[in-house]
Amino acid sequence: MRLPALLIPLALLATDGGPKSGADLVRQMHHRYTGTWYRNLTFVQTTTFPDRPPETWYEAGTIPGKLRIDIAPLDSMKVFMYVGDSAIVFEGGKRVAARRDRNLLMTLGFDVYGQRPETTIAQLKAQSIDLDRIREDTWDGTKVWVVGADKGDTTTNQFWIEQKRLLFVRLIEAHKSQKNPSAAPSLLDITFENYQPLGKAWVAPRCVIKLNGKEVQREEYRDIRADVKLQPDLYDPVTYHKATWIEAK
């Protein structure tokens, strides 16, 4: 018995719609928001810790791969910055530290929608995420794709993507101590929560960071703006420049 021609595409879609690998998923995420995701955003962040007073951070991110965090009070000229695969620290307007360190939260939460999928795939592989391993699960009552680890494995590098909107919701990442390489790695568990619309795309105004199962940092964003005019030297990795967008907002 032959299916009517018009029903064949529907039948195929019903049985063959999910990604077969993490690389497939990255391509689907990029395709979903091609031409609609914002190119940059700014926001004011309240950062709370379990053992010290909260702080105010002013953040500007540009896709792909650029993030600047100015720590209040602004006259301290204390800045953390990610540019590509490097992390840079300024204190008192002087560059005091730099190391190789890619921010996977930028890669998975933002850059994936604005850079070539093959670039994102290469960056994830470089962070020891097994893109050939993918499964379905649920997170906070929502269906997700999990890439990098089997069910029940909470120690292997992995990321979780909401199925419906193809949005990043969780990253688990092991970090080895540079001072003591033989020690057991510390385990970061980071979630993006409470997504809300921003332009034609989305932003998660809450980020929760756990270290070895204990919450160590919570971030709440406000005054979130997309596609802001930013100065050309905002992300200069060598020389400090005042972030003019903060006063202009």
Image: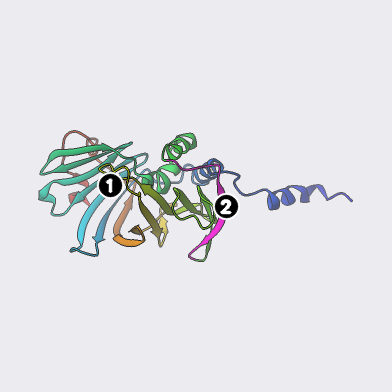
What residue do we see at 16% from left, 54% from top? Answer: 72
Residue 226 rendering spot, x and y as whole percentages = 34, 49
Query: Does residue 235 appear to the left or right of 112 in the view shown?
Result: left
Q: Secondary structure at mark 1?
A: strand
Residue 34 rendering spot, x and y as whole percentages = 49, 42
Q: Amino acid at mark 2?
A: Arg
Vertical position of residue 66 compared to residue 71: above or below = above
Residue 119 rendering spot, x and y as whole percentages = 45, 34
Residue 138 rendering spot, x and y as whole percentages = 53, 61
What residue do we see at 29% from left, 45% from top? Answer: 177
Magenta region, residue range: 128-140
Vertical position of residue 45 compared to residue 180: above or below = below
Which mark, by number, is residue 60? 1
Mark 1, residues whose alpha carbon is within 10 Å: few (<14), some, or many (≥20)? Answer: many
Closest to the camera, between mark 1 and mark 2, is 2
Residue placed under numbered mark 2 in the picture = 135
Q: Nearer the viewer, residue 155 or 191?
A: 155
Query: Does residue 93 appear to the left or right of 84 in the view shown?
Result: left
Residue lying at the far front of the rendered structure: 182
Magenta-span inclusion, residue 56:
no
Q: Amino acid at mark 1?
A: Ala
What residue do we see at 16% from left, 34% from top? Answer: 239
- Kindly indicate whether the residue at mark 2 contacts the one at mark 1 (C-beta within 8 angstroms): no
Q: Secondary structure at mark 2?
A: strand
The mark nearer the N terminus, 1 or 2, is 1
